[in-house]
Amino acid sequence: MNTNVSGDTATFGAGCFWCVEAVFERLEGVLHVESGYSGGHVVNPTYKEVCNGTTGHAEVTRIVYDPAKVSFKDLLEVFWKTHDPTTLNRQGNDVGTQYRSVIFYHNEEQKQLAGEYKKKLDESGAFNNPIVTEISPLINYYPAEDYHQNYYEENPAQGYCQFVIRPKVEKFEKVFGSKMKEEYKK
């Protein structure tokens, strides 16, 4: 992670980290986004190990943000609206515990805000099924291999990027257009 970037940090898992990274890097106030692994028992896991589903890690995105420009509540809103928090260990065709919906909180305030938002969203009936998003303390984080970083921007013509990531980015742009960084506005 770029150690020259300072701000508050959030860590979210919402399926494939390439998708989550592509969405959050477009959000105004986000300073840095990095794909990685968190929540498991293996030290410094590889992508292959995480994909085997035996490490306990989730694919996550670590988001460094400027709280003067974007709040943790804003990040939560994007998180909840850009994936399906009702599917256990799955997002679309990506299946396994590594693709679980999870908020790894960094402090008690994040824990409280995430829990309150989850409860209100669940009670609202916005989803047909109960929300299964895990809310857990951040106990470890390992950056993913370099080739996973900024994947969508580096590989826009790749099939997964075209058919899975691009629709999520387009949905984000439609719903959160007013909150996008200028360089991503069309």
Image (spheres, rainbow, N blue to C red):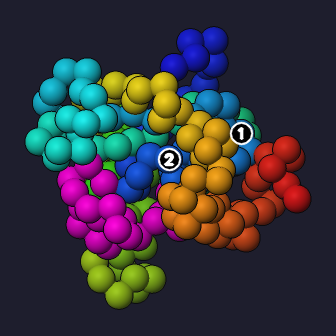
User: How packed is label 2: few (under 14 Cα within 10 Å), some, or many (20 or more)?
Assistant: many
Magenta region includes residue 93 = yes
- The residues tagged by marks 1 and 2 sit, at their Cα atoms, a distance apart of 19 Å
Instruction: Say which of 54 and 65 sits in front.
Output: 54
Query: Considering the numbered disc 2 on the image, is that residue within a helix, a strand or a loop?
Result: helix
**Residue 25 falls in image quadrant:** top right
Quick one: which residue is furthest to the top in this view? 4
Q: Position of residue 145 (x, y in %)?
A: 41, 26
The answer to which of marks 1 and 2 sits earlier in the sequence is 2
Residue occupying image coordinates x 17% and y 44%: 52
Residue at image point 61% right, 44% down: 155
Question: Badge 2 is on which residue?
Answer: 18
The amino acid type found where label 1 is placed reads: Gly
Q: Is residue 28 above or below residue 1?
A: below
Q: Is residue 173 visible?
A: yes
In magenta stretch: residue 73: no
Which percent across, then down, holds residue 129? 30, 83
Task: Provide the secondary structure element on which disc 1 rests.
Answer: loop
Q: Position of residue 102 (x, y in %)?
A: 32, 52
Which residue is depicted at the point 22% across and 57% down?
A: 96
Left or right of 4 in this view: 147: left
Query: Disc 1 marks which residue?
Result: 29
Q: Nearer the viewer, residue 70 or 25?
A: 25
Q: Amino acid at mark 2?
A: Trp
The residue lying at 26 percent from left, 62 percent from top is: 95
Report whether residue 24 is seen.
no
**Residue 29 at x, y = what percent?**
71, 39
Is the C-beta separation of discs 1 and 2 under 8 Å? no
The relative height of residue 105 versus residue 85 in the rendered view (above or below) is above
Task: Please state the extent of the stretch shown in magenta in the rendering.
Answer: 79-99
Foreground of the two, 5 or 149: 149
